[in-house]
C-alpha cells in the first residue's frame, strides 16, 4: 500500500506539477483546488498526509490563511500536515508549527514553494517516518474460526456506511492496524468480542521476532467517540491496575477511525470467555467466584475507595443519564405505545395482559395478578436515595464486555462511559443482566414466579427451592450479588429497586412497536414489563389489597386471595411462589376433601402418575415438606396439611 497524500493548492499548474512529481515517487496523490474540495476529499477518502497551500482562496489576499485554518480543525488533528506557501512569513510559520494539539501541531513542516521539489519530497518522507509510521511489512491474518474482514468491521462500526465508501474505509481501517502494531511483524485477528454503536472490540494476537506473542483487546471505532473513550479511561482508570487490571498500551488515529489496544494482566486472551458465556456454561461455583472477584477486586479498584456527594441531581436523574435516555424517546406517549404493542402480542404465549386504568393485569392458568403501571416513575420518580453518593465506574457493564476465566478472574474492556455513577450502579447493573437477559426459561408464567421471589422476598434471603430448576441458577447468582451489595444498600433498598426498575424500562425503550417479536424476545420483554410493574408497586405508595375474604374470616386459619397472589396464615402474610403456591391452591380448592397422590402428581406436578416411580414419589414428598415448612408452626406435627396413610393429603383451612 503506497503512501496517500492530499495536495491542496488553488494554482492548478503548480498543483498538477507537484502531484505528478510525487506520483513518480510512488505516492498516491489526491488533488484539491479549494478548502471545500479539500474537505470533500478528507470526508470521502482517506490520506496519510496533507500538503496544504496557506492561501487556498486568494493568492493576492495577505489575510487569507484558509489553509492554516483548515490545518487547525480538530476533525483533522490526527492527520500530519505540511504547510506550503509562496509567501512565507515568521508569523504564519509560528502558527503552523505550534502549539501542539493532541501530540501533533497544526503542521509538521512549513515550506516555501520556491524551495523546490526535492525539499518538498524530503519533508514528505520525513513526515511519513516520524508521524505516519504505517508498517507495510506487517503480516495480517485472521483466525479461521473468526470470519473477520475489514469491510465487515467497517459495517459494524458504521452501519449506515454508503457502499461506495466501503472499500476506502476498509483500507483505512486496515492501515489503522498497521500503524497500531508498527513494532510487530505479524498479527492475528483472533475473534470478535463485542460490538456497540460506533465501536467493536477484537482479540488480537501480536508477534515479534525473538519475543513471546502478546494478546491484546483492541477496541476500534469512529474517531471522536474513541477519543472520548480514551480521555475517560485516562481520567477514571485506577492508577495501579492490579491482578485483573486492563491497561491502555497503544493508541492511534486516522481521519475517520481510532483504535486502542489494551493489555490484560496475567492471562492469555485466547483462553478467556465473556462473563455471559461463562454464566451459560460454567458451574455455579465458578460463576459465583467470578461475580465476587468482579465486584471485590476488578470494580473495587475503579472505585478508588472514594465516595463523592452530589447535592445537585436526584438519583432518578442520574440513572436516566447513565442509561442515555436523552438519545431515545422515553416520553409517556412512546412508553404507552410500546406497552400496548407488547400487550397485543402476548396472547400468543398463552397469557393475557391488559393495560388500562394505570394498571397491568396478568391472567394466566386461571389466576390473575394486578400491578401498577410503571409510567409514573418516568414522569414523577420518587425522591429516594438523597443525598446521592457517587463512585468512579468503568461505565455500563455488559455480559460481552466483561472477560472471565475458569478461575473466576475478570477483566473489563469497555470504557466509553467511564466516570462517576451512583454507588449502586455496578452491582445493580449486573443483577439486571442476570435477571432480564440471562434467564433461559421460555415460560412467562415461570418467569413471573421468579419475579415474585425476587420482589417479595427479603433482600438477602431469596428462597429458590419452589422455583423450577432453570430459574434457581439466576436466583443464586443474584443472591451472591446482593450479599456483596449489602454494605452499599444498607438501609436504603428502595434506591436499588429504583435502579432495577429503570433498567427494566430501559430495555423496553428499545422496543419498536411496529415490529413483530420472536417468541424468545416476546417472553423476555413480557418478563421485563412485569418486573417493571412489580418494582413500581414496591416503590409506590402503599395501597390496600382488596381481598375475597374479610378480616374476620382470615383472622385464623388459611386464606388465599388468588387475584393478588396473596396467602395469609392466621392473619399473617406468607410468601409462597412456584410449586408451593400452586400446591396450596389445589389443596385449598378441594378442602377439606382428601386429595390422592395421583391427583396431586397429575394436577400440580404435571406428570403421568406412576406408583413405581421412586423419583416421582420423592418429588411429591419434597413438595409436601416444603409447603409444611412455609405454613405450619411445627412442620413435624402439622395442623393444616395432614397425611392420610395410604391415601393422600387433606388440607384443613381452620
Image (cartoon, helix red, strand yellow):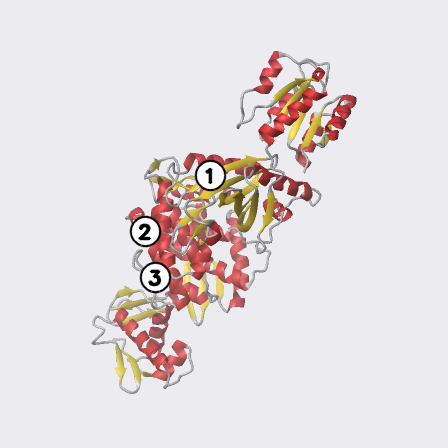
Which of the 4 image quadrants contains residue 550?
bottom left
Q: Which residue is mark 2?
A: 484
> How crowded is the residue under tag 3: few (<14 C-alpha within 10 Å), some, or many (20+)?
few
- Distance of label 3 from label 1 (alpha carbons): 56 Å
Of the numbered discs 3 and 1, the one sitting upstream in the chain is 1
Q: Is residue 232 above or below residue 514?
A: above
Label 2 or label 3, whichever lies nearer to me, is 2
Q: Is residue 202 visible?
A: no
Q: Name the residue rendered at 39%, 85% in the picture.
A: 610
Give the structural element (helix, strand or loop) at label 3.
loop
Residue 623 at x, y percent in the picture:
32, 74
Residue 59 at x, y percent in the picture:
73, 16
Residue 398 at x, y percent in the picture:
46, 50
> How crowded is the residue under tag 2: few (<14 C-alpha within 10 Å), some, or many (20+)?
some
Q: Residue furthest bottom?
A: 646
- Distance of label 2 from label 1 (alpha carbons): 28 Å
Going by the image, does 470 lie left or right of 94?
left
Give the structural element (helix, strand or loop) at label 2.
helix
Q: Which mark is residue 545?
A: 3
> How crowded is the residue under tag 1: few (<14 C-alpha within 10 Å), some, or many (20+)?
some
Q: Is residue 544 above or below residue 136?
A: below
Which of the 4 image quadrants contains residue 60?
top right
Give the structural element (helix, strand or loop) at label 1.
strand
Which of the 4 image quadrants contains residue 282?
bottom left
Q: Which residue is mark 1?
A: 248
Amino acid at each position: 500500500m503506497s503512501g496517500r497524500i492530499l495536495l491542496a493548492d488553488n494554482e492548478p499548474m503548480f498543483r498538477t506539477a507537484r502531484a505528478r512529481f510525487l506520483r513518480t515517487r510512488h505516492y498516491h496523490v489526491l488533488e484539491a483546488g479549494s478548502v471545500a474540495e479539500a474537505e470533500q476529499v478528507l470526508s470521502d477518502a482517506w490520506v496519510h498526509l496533507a500538503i496544504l497551500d496557506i492561501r487556498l482562496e486568494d493568492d493576492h489576499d495577505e489575510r487569507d490563511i484558509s489553509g492554516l485554518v483548515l490545518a487547525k480543525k480538530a476533525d483533522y488533528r490526527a492527520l500530519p500536515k505540511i504547510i506550503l506557501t509562496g509567501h512565507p512569513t515568521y508569523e504564519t510559520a509560528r502558527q503552523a508549527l505550534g502549539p501542539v494539539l493532541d501530540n501533533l501541531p497544526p503542521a509538521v513542516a512549513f515550506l516555501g514553494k520556491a524551495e523546490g521539489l526535492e525539499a518538498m519530497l524530503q519533508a514528505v518522507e520525513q513526515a511519513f517516518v516520524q508521524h505516519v509510521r504505517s508498517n507495510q511489512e506487517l503480516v495480517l491474518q485472521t483466525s479461521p474460526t473468526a470470519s473477520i474482514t475489514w469491510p465487515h468491521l467497517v459495517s459494524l462500526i458504521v452501519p449506515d456506511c454508503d457502499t461506495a465508501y466501503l472499500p476506502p474505509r476498509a483500507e483505512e481501517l486496515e492501515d489503522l492496524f498497521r500503524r497500531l502494531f508498527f513494532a510487530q511483524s505479524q498479527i492475528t485477528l483472533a475473534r470478535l468480542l463485542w460490538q456497540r454503536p460506533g465501536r467493536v472490540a477484537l482479540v488480537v494476537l501480536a508477534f515479534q521476532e525473538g519475543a513471546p506473542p502478546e494478546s491484546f483487546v483492541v477496541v476500534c471505532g469512529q474517531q471522536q467517540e474513541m477519543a472520548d473513550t480514551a480521555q475517560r479511561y485516562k481520567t477514571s482508570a485506577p492508577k495501579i491496575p492490579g491482578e485483573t487490571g486492563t491497561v491502555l498500551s497503544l493508541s492511534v488515529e486516522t481521519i475517520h477511525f481510532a483504535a486502542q489496544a489494551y493489555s490484560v494482566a496475567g492471562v492469555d486472551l485466547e483462553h478467556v470467555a465473556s462473563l455471559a458465556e461463562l454464566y451459560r456454561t460454567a458451574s455455579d461455583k465458578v460463576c459465583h467466584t467470578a461475580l465476587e472477584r468482579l465486584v471485590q477486586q476488578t470494580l473495587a479498584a475503579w472505585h478508588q475507595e472514594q465516595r463523592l456527594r452530589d447535592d445537585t441531581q436526584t438519583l432518578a436523574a442520574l440513572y436516566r443519564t447513565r442509561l442515555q435516555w436523552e438519545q431515545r424517546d422515553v416520553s409517556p406517549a412512546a412508553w404507552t405505545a410500546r406497552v400496548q404493542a407488547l400487550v397485543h402480542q402476548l396472547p400468543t404465549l398463552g397469557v393475557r395482559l391488559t393495560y388500562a386504568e394505570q394498571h397491568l393485569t396478568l391472567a394466566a392458568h386461571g389466576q390473575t395478578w394486578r400491578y401498577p403501571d410503571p409510567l409514573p416513575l418516568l414522569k414523577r420518580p420518587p425522591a429516594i436515595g438523597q443525598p446521592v453518593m457517587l463512585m468512579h465506574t468503568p461505565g455500563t457493564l455488559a455480559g460481552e464486555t466483561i472477560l472471565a476465566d475458569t478461575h473466576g478472574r475478570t477483566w473489563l474492556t469497555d470504557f466509553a462511559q467511564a466516570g462517576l455513577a451512583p454507588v449502586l450502579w455496578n452491582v445493580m447493573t449486573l443483577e439486571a443482566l442476570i435477571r432480564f437477559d440471562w434467564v433461559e426459561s421460555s415460560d412467562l408464567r415461570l418467569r413471573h414466579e421468579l419475579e415474585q421471589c425476587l420482589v417479595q422476598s427479603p433482600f438477602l434471603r431469596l428462597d429458590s427451592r419452589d422455583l423450577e430448576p432453570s430459574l434457581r441458577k439466576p436466583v443464586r447468582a443474584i443472591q451472591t450479588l446482593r450479599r456483596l451489595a449489602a454494605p452499599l444498600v444498607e438501609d436504603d433498598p428502595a434506591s436499588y429497586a429504583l435502579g432495577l426498575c429503570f433498567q427494566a424500562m430501559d430495555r423496553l425503550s428499545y422496543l419498536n412497536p411496529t415490529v413483530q417479536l420472536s417468541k424468545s424476545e416476546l417472553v423476555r420483554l413480557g418478563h421485563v414489563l412485569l418486573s417493571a410493574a412489580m418494582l413500581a408497586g414496591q416503590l409506590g405508595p402503599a395501597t390496600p389489597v382488596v381481598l375475597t375474604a374479610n378480616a374476620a374470616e382470615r383472622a385464623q386459619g388459611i386464606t388465599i386471595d388468588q387475584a393478588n397472589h396473596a396467602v395469609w396464615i392466621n392473619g399473617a402474610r406468607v410468601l409462597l411462589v412456584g410449586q408451593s403456591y400452586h400446591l396450596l391452591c389445589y389443596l385449598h380448592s378441594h378442602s377439606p376433601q382428601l386429595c390422592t397422590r395421583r391427583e396431586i402428581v397429575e394436577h400440580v406436578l404435571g406428570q403421568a402418575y406412576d406408583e413405581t416411580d421412586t423419583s416421582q414419589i420423592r418429588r411429591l414428598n419434597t413438595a409436601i415438606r416444603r409447603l409444611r415448612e412455609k405454613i405450619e408452626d411445627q412442620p413435624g406435627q402439622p395442623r393444616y396439611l395432614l397425611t392420610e396413610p395410604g391415601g393422600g393429603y387433606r388440607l384443613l383451612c381452620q
